[in-house]
Image: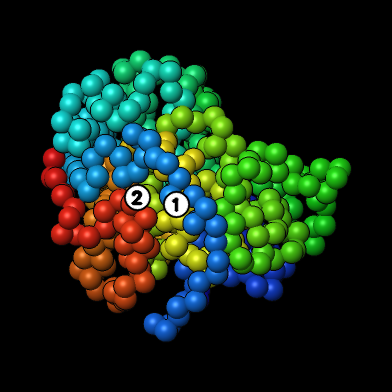
Amino acid sequence: MTARGYGSMDRWWEMRRREFLKVSAIASAGIVLGQPAAASDEDTGKPRTNVDEVKDLPRTDTSLPGARPGRVVAVHDPAVGPGGEPDPAVVAAMFARGLAALTGEDPRASLAALHICPDDVVGLKVNPVGPGLISTHHELVEAVIAWLEQGGVPRRNIVIWDRFESMLADAGFTPDRYPGVRIEALQILDEAAFAEDNTDTSGYLDADGRHVSADRFDPDVVYWADCAAPQDPNYLNQHVFTDRRSPFGKLVTRDLTRIINLPVFKNTGNGISMATKNLGYGAIANTGRLHKPLFFDVCTEVLAFPAIRDKLVLNVTDGLRGQYDGGPGANASFIYDHHTLYLATDPFALDMTCHRRLVAKRKAMEVEVNEHPRYTEYLHYGERLGLGIADPARIEVVEA
């Protein structure tokens, strides 16, 4: 498999990728960039996980698939302009139209329809990969914040978050851009430690040899999988833990009361890297070890935990731009203006809809497409767990 960098990311990210590949004998682009490992049609083995411990836990009125199971709203408007510089007013209008079509309510009432109250702490999970090319647009984030404020949620109760602190900053998610809004990452990553021949671990290990971000993760809420992790320093730097535990961030388990998911419209090989993956790999640590044996299933099983299942109330896939090949890292050769937002409370119906549309785009661009069921089985798995609807015949797609 060919390793790809993150296109427009700062130079340190490319350095980080190269050096990690050098020091880790089992590392691959799948570990570093989140691409699925190549698999044959006969691959059926799956490591044990602890999903059975959580999948049948009691549900609440906010549990997935949410207030509108199986409904996906697509809002298309060429007037939004080029994907790199969308018109904020048009984006806001698109978002409002989508909310109305999804909930049947005006913008203020739609908050209550989605179980969002003024005293909630609302986390906006962005995707900062490929800033300026394919990351979550600021215009969309600003429209969501304005909607929350209109409904009475104070800015201090709004959190823009992702896993890596440096990636948020690189993509422009900073306090200067969003005054009064909290910007929080689940962990730091010491980019200098990826430099060639650098053995200094002081930037990411404390005096006891623990990752300095370890306390940001919840030891009581853990996705366990029987998959070994690399034991080299660079893996520890990037992934915080090197055992068989992938703890959830405390921000997710203890602080946020509602989550709004803002992924982008892009591929990962013949699959997609959208709503379920933005949270499946974004809410936990120690994910590199999971890519080869459990890649797509992680996107389902992590969402079965109440920390996500009972808090995720809205997904908005940012398709102002799309990427039909070369993902999940940004690749300018395959990015195009898609001019579409997709809204759903049900991330599995949303991802199935977007998967089918991305496959159609790949075919239109004469990209060789493998339509093996493994690329959507994880979505049907989510339906079997009661987390959403993946059967296209049961999904209602509304064009708004």
- Residue type at numbered disc 2: Leu
Circle 2: element type: loop
Q: Single out the residue that lies furthest toward the right.
A: 207
**Residue in the foreground of this view, choosing between 24 and 86:** 24
Give the CA distance from mark 2 to mark 1. 9 Å
**Residue in the foreground of this view, choosing between 225 and 208:** 225
Circle 1: element type: loop
Residue occupying image coordinates x 13% and y 40%: 400
Q: Which mark is residue 273?
A: none
Task: Classify residue 238 as left or right of residue 340.
Answer: right
Q: Pinpoint residue 49: horizontal percent, then vertical percent.
A: 54, 61
Q: Classify 10 Å Cα crowding around label 2: few (below 14), some (14-19), many (20 and above).
A: many
The colouring scheme, among rainbow, by chain, secondary structure or one colour, is rainbow
Residue 317 lies in what quarter of the image?
A: top left
- Residue type at numbered disc 1: Lys
Task: Classify residue 245 as left or right of residue 391.
Answer: right
Residue occupying image coordinates x 23% and y 21%: 109
**Up-down relation of residue 91 to residue 290 (above or below):** above
Residue annotated with mark 1: 55
Q: Pinpoint residue 303: horizontal percent, then vertical percent.
A: 44, 49
Q: Single out the residue that lies furthest toward the left.
A: 399
Visible residue check, residue 381: yes
Residue 61 lies in what quarter of the image?
A: top left
Q: Quick one: label 2 or label 1, which is nearer the N terminus?
A: 1
Q: Pinpoint residue 275: horizontal percent, then vertical percent.
A: 37, 49
Q: Classify 10 Å Cα crowding around label 1: few (below 14), some (14-19), many (20 and above).
A: some
Camera-near label (2 vs 1) is 1
Q: Pinpoint residue 3: horizontal percent, then vertical percent.
A: 53, 69
Residue occupying image coordinates x 35% and y 50%: 387
Residue annotated with mark 2: 387
